[in-house]
Amino acid sequence: MWSGAGASQLMMGVSMVVDCTFEFVAYFVVDYVIRLIGHAGIMYIGLLGYAIRFVVYASVRNPWTILAVEPLQGLFVTCLNRPTCIVWHWLLLIKKFS
């Protein structure tokens, strides 16, 4: 993705490690946050986070500055994936028992 912007393979590898690490940790925290603000609230946070990330990505000049944004990638992916999976699970259970 960043090779066209002059990023080295090392930078892209470090970016993936940072992203995956924060995503892994976020999956342990997201259930607690869902209980606090609800499914819709955490999905709004995830969508807002994506908007912020896209603005930052569009304004980046040095590919290494992406590493400052990559932790947000992991967090916001989790904010959208986990509640979506929970809602689909509920919908499938409702369909199964109705």
Image (spheres, helix red, strand yellow):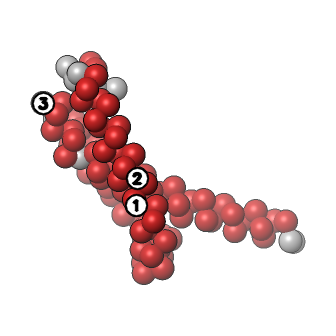
Q: Which residue is mark 2?
A: 23
Residue 61 screen position, x and y as percent: 12, 30
Question: Is there CB contact under 8 Å for labels 1 and 2?
Answer: yes
Amino acid found under the numbered disc labelled 3: Arg
Which secondary structure, mark 3? loop
Amino acid found under the numbered disc labelled 1: Ala
**Real-space CA distance between mark 2 and mark 3, rounded to the nearest whole angstrom:** 25 Å
Split into 4 quadrants, where in the image is the N terminus?
A: top left
Question: Is there CB contact under 8 Å for labels 3 and 1?
Answer: no
Above or below: residue 66 compared with residue 25? above
Instruction: Mark 1: give few (<14), some (14-19) or many (20+) Cα within 10 Å.
Output: some
Q: Residue at x 45, y 76 (%)?
A: 32
Q: Residue at x 76, y 62 (%)?
A: 92
**First in sequence: mark 2 vs mark 3:** 2
Residue 80 vs residue 62: left or right?
right
Residue 34 screen position, x and y as percent: 47, 74
Q: Residue at x 35, y 53 (%)?
A: 22
Residue 88 vs residue 14: left or right?
right
Amino acid found under the numbered disc labelled 2: Glu
Q: Which residue is mark 1?
A: 26
Above or below: residue 98 compared with residue 43? below
**Real-space CA distance between mark 3 and mark 1, rounded to the nearest whole angstrom:** 28 Å
Q: Mark on residue 61?
A: 3
The answer to whether residue 53 is seen in the rendering is no
Residue 19 screen position, x and y as percent: 34, 45
Residue 57 vs residue 36: left or right?
left
